[in-house]
């Protein structure tokens, strides 16, 4: 089984977000980058588990970015991916990202193309669905479990009062949500092995369909109003008359 | 310049975010001097669907073919693409729910039309605002394409009633001969009656401060009195005290209720990333230095085991007086 896992570089969750160039660009100063958690913890780890269970197969990671993203590619290789593809393009929007990935994937006959449910920077939930649309493949989004047997994938998604079990033929594009796998910490052997694994660089370009014109930060939150634990009625009164939420 | 709104209906009803999207689409149409059509996907009665007329939709296309009885993004997208063609829509609106997250990108790819997902306001000129960096900032996006797709973040732009009526037409022909690549089986695992977390207006959430799963009774009781959904922090779902689908935060679910009550949760930045869109936050914690107090509107410092039952009682009293 050949699996392609799409990963994205995102600022670490604890990053203090600021902007530069008249608020038109993200300020990368002192920012630590990580693999987008949904891509890493859920999609990549589950892909590796499937390969291990089958005893054969290949897990390739793909990311779109300039050479600066190589550290997070090495991290994903250290977790256990077999090889990597870097599409050498500065990703400007979800469509251009999805298009260059779909173009690459179309030439390489993957059984599964896996993404995280969204990235924690642009929060779009777009790339997976776009890849599926561009390649005319079925798509299951926000899957919380994934099994593969007899050339079919069986997935679960959360619904209001339970789950839905979805059986899909391969090839399939899916996005992974919490529950699909548990995070893995790369061990020393994985880290050493990652140094010599191949990163194929593919040139591509695609015009974005949308662009960020300006970033803004939310207005600072006013200070918390502390309420005496002996006077809970005051809380109810404030929630009713001031916050107007009950 | 026509506008098309695409919504999913569940259990024969239009959700509140569905009405928000209908109204949003009608306002886009009004600004462009055109009309707004709505496509409903899923089972619904004509009378129920006609309600979108109140929010300014002039025509509703009803697609309730068996292919959309379960959530198959490909079937939904096929119907939506037919509706785009039939209406000549150049502005397409979705709810940023599971339908908008799976179907809008597919439409965007097929039409090569720009998509801004999770918009939080009406467009200004060619640009529209959305949350980025998990609620820590906003970005104004502009479109480079003539056809524009927007998915609207629930609970962001309140619907405006206009008092009109909508005609309803069947739109099942769009899926004639469609064969789904997915077979879907529903597994209902919980008793009905509880409030689903994703769209809940009030959420009561608790963390490690509860000391054990056996102490969740008081959290559930407070949620019941408020008509709220229950949620939890990541450590609590990781240890198995609560189910994974209740985990809100960076790696779980992001929610934006009107009222979020956090009990015994310290407020790590990863947790805040999932709840910072809440309109009002109440924090109960015994540690006055808990970082969550900095993000809270109202705070109570003290023992959850004493305070939560008191809040429940006070809310109950308030509800009885205001019933």
Image (cartoon, grey):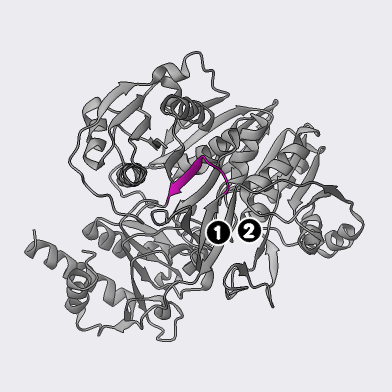
Q: Which residues are magenta?
A: B144-152
Mark 2, residue position: A37
Is residue B190 found left or right of B179 in the rendered image? Answer: left
Residue A28: x %, y % from top left: 68, 72
Q: Residues within 10 Å of mark 1 (few under 14, many from 20)?
A: many
The disc label shown at residue B251, or none:
1
Q: Is residue A34 above or below residue B116?
A: below
What secondary structure is marked by label 1?
loop
Q: Is residue A210 above or below residue B190?
A: below
Return the residue nearer the eye: B69 or A129.
A129
Q: Residue furthest right?
A: A196
The disc label shown at residue A120, or none:
none
Q: Taking the image as drawn, is residue A238 in sight?
A: yes
What secondary structure is marked by label 2?
helix
Q: Is residue B113 above or below residue B87?
A: below
Tell me the chain of label 2: A
For image coordinates 51% across by 50% down, the residue present is B116
Q: Residue A54's quadrant in the figure? A: top right
Is residue B72 found left or right of B288 in the rendered image? Answer: right
């Amino acid at each position: 089984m050949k699996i392609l896992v799409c990963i994205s570089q995102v600022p670490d969750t604890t990053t203090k977000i600021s902007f530069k160039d008249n608020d038109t660009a993200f300020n990368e100063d002192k920012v630590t980058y990580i693999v987008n958690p949904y891509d890493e913890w859920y999609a990549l780890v589950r892909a590796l588990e499937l390969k291990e269970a089958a005893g054969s197969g290949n897990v390739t990671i793909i990311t779109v970015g300039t050479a600066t993203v190589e550290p997070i590619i090495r991290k994903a290789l250290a977790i256990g991916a077999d090889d990597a593809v870097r599409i050498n393009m500065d990703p400007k929007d979800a469509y251009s990202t999805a298009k260059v990935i779909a173009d690459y994937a179309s030439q390489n006959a993957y059984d599964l193309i896996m993404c995280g449910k969204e990235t924690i920077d642009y929060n779009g939930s777009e790339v997976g669905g776009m890849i599926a649309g561009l390649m005319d493949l079925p798509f299951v989004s926000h899957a919380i479990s994934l099994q593969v047997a007899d050339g079919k994938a069986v997935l679960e998604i959360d619904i209001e009062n339970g789950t839905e079990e979805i059986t899909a033929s391969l090839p399939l594009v899916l996005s992974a949500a919490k529950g699909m796998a548990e995070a893995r910490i790369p061990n020393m052997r994985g880290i050493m092995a990652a140094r010599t694994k191949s990163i194929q660089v593919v040139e591509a370009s695609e015009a974005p369909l949308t662009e960020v014109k300006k970033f803004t930060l939310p207005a600072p939150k006013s200070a918390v109003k502390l309420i005496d634990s002996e006077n809970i009625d005051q809380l109810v009164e404030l929630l009713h008359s001031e916050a107007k939420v009950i | 310049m026509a506008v098309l709104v695409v919504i999913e209906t569940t259990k024969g009803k239009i959700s509140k975010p569905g009405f928000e999207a209908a109204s949003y689409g009608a306002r886009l149409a009004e600004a462009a001097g055109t009309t707004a059509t709505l496509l409903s996907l899923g089972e619904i009665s004509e009378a129920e669907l006609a309600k979108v007329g109140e929010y300014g939709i002039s025509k509703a296309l009803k697609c309730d073919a068996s292919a959309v009885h379960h959530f198959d993004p490909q079937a939904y997208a096929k119907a939506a693409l037919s509706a785009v063609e039939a209406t000549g829509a150049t502005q397409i609106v979705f709810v940023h729910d599971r339908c908008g997250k799976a179907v809008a990108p597919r439409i965007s790819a097929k039409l090569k039309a720009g998509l801004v997902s999770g918009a939080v306001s009406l467009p200004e000129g060619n640009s529209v605002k959305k949350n980025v960096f998990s609620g820590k900032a906003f970005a104004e996006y502009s479109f480079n394409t003539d056809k524009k797709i927007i998915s609207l973040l629930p609970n962001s732009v309140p619907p405006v009633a206009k008092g009109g009526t909508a005609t309803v037409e069947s739109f099942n022909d769009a899926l004639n001969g469609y064969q789904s690549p997915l077979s879907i089986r529903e597994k209902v695992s919980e008793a009905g009656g509880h409030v689903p977390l994703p769209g809940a207006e009030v959420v009561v959430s608790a963390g490690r401060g509860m000391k054990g799963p056996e102490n969740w009774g008081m959290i559930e009781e407070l949620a019941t009195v408020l008509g709220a959904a229950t949620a939890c922090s990541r450590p609590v779902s990781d240890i198995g005290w609560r189910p994974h689908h209740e985990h809100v935060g960076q790696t779980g679910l992001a929610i934006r209720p009107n009222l979020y009550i956090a009990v015994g949760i310290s407020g790590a930045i990863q947790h805040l990333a999932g709840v910072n869109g809440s309109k009002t936050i109440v924090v109960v914690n015994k540690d006055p230095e808990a970082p969550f107090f900095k993000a809270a509107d109202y705070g109570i410092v003290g023992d959850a085991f004493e305070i939560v039952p008191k809040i429940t009682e006070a809310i109950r009293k308030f509800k009885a007086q205001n019933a």
